[in-house]
Image (cartoon, rainbow, N blue to C red):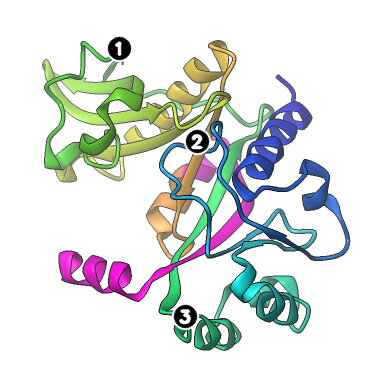
């Protein structure tokens, strides 16, 4: 695959998720669409969105409920694209969402591989490509980013790093949709800052591409170690997304993480 083909596949998937057309992300004008469900949407998404903003850097596509279509349109056309995803401007949108029992919850940056940069560094430890039967016993807290206990059936491939036979690092991917597999990675604390994460992430990305799927990587833009890993692995920032959830949902998440 070329970088252009990878980007096109990503925009086609975002269009499915946002209930719009891929070309909408390349427009010089913002667009508001009414969110809907789709059988090929990313499996972890809860559709329809009440309010979701996505940008590939050109504009904003807002996939929303009819209840906030006019409010969201006014918001995204009031501020520059990049400022709509950060305070203090996002408080303007959040104020309106709270009137409907909703508030901004998820904010993430998504990365795609750069074919010209996807040359993972050598790992200082033994690595193994793993299939589901190989990592069936790895659903443990230390591997919670690489594997997902709640969606085991989507975890399809992994690459592990071993020190004298002991698993010390794991990059796994989930088949979140038909064309794209998402990568997550964990390294045990004593082995961090040794290039293991980037080696595993890059190697897994190549394994995914060899299976004619597009690997993608997601993290909060404030998660500097994760962003650094993405870049070191040969990934580049491609799109951002911000999603509203109910106030009860947000409160429950805060309680669980407190």
Q: Residue 21 lies in what quarter of the image?
A: top right
> Pointer 3: what residue?
100
Question: In screen coordinates, is 246 left or right of 55?
Answer: left
Q: Residue at x 49, y 50 (%)?
A: 47
Q: For this rendering, which residue is in front, 140 or 102?
A: 102
- Using the image, determine if residue 181 lies above or below residue 235: above
**In the rendering, at what x and y percent does residue 185 appear?**
33, 37
Q: In this rendering, which labeled residue sits more in front, label 1 or label 3?
A: 3
- Using the image, determine if residue 249 lies above or below residue 119: below
Question: In screen coordinates, is 175 left or right of 19?
Answer: left
Quarter of the rendering occupied by the N terminus: top right
Cβ–Cβ below 8 Å for labels 1 and 2? no
Question: In screen coordinates, is 215 left or right of 254?
Answer: right
| Cα separation between marks 1 and 2 | 21 Å
Question: In screen coordinates, is 99 left or right of 9?
Answer: left
Q: Which sits earlier in the primary sequence, circle 1 or circle 2? A: 1
| Circle 1 crowding by C-alpha within 10 Å: few under 14, some 14–19, many from 20 | some
Give the numbered dot on residue 131. 1
Confirm whether the magenta stretch covers residue 159. Answer: no
Q: In this rendering, which labeled residue sits more in front, label 3 or label 2?
A: 3
Q: Which sits earlier in the primary sequence, circle 1 or circle 3? A: 3
> Pointer 2: what residue?
233
Q: Secondary structure at mark 2?
A: loop
Q: Secondary structure at mark 3?
A: loop
Q: Residue at x 29, y 13 (%)?
A: 130
Q: For this rendering, which residue is in front, 129 or 133?
A: 133
Q: Residue at x 69, y 31 (%)?
A: 9
Q: Bounds of the magenta span?
A: 230-257
| Circle 3 crowding by C-alpha within 10 Å: few under 14, some 14–19, many from 20 | few
């Amino acid at each position: 695959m070329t970088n252009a083909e990878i980007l096109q596949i990503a925009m086609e998937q975002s269009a499915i998720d946002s209930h719009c057309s891929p070309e909408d992300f390349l427009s010089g004008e913002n667009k508001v669409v009414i969110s809907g469900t789709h059988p090929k949407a990313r499996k972890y998404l809860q559709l329809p969105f009440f309010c979701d903003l996505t940008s590939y850097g050109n504009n904003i596509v807002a996939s929303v409920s009819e209840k906030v279509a006019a409010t969201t349109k006014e918001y995204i056309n009031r501020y520059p694209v990049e400022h709509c995803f950060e305070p203090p401007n996002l408080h303007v949108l959040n104020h309106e969402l709270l009137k409907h029992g909703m508030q901004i919850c998820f904010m993430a940056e998504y990365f795609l591989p750069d074919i010209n940069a996807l040359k993972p560094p050598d790992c200082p430890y033994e690595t193994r490509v793993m299939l589901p039967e190989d990592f069936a016993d790895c659903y443990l807290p230390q591997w919670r980013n690489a594997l997902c206990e709640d969606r085991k059936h989507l975890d399809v491939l992994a690459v592990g790093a071993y020190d004298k036979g002991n698993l010390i690092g794991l990059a796994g991917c989930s088949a979140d949709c038909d064309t794209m597999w998402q990568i997550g990675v964990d390294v045990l604390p004593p082995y961090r800052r040794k290039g293991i994460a980037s080696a595993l992430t890059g190697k897994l990305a190549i394994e995914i591409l060899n299976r004619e799927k597009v690997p993608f990587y997601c993290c909060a833009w404030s998660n500097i170690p994760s962003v650094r890993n993405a870049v070191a692995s040969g990934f580049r920032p491609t799109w951002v997304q911000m999603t509203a959830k109910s106030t009860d949902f947000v409160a429950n998440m805060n309680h669980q993480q407190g």
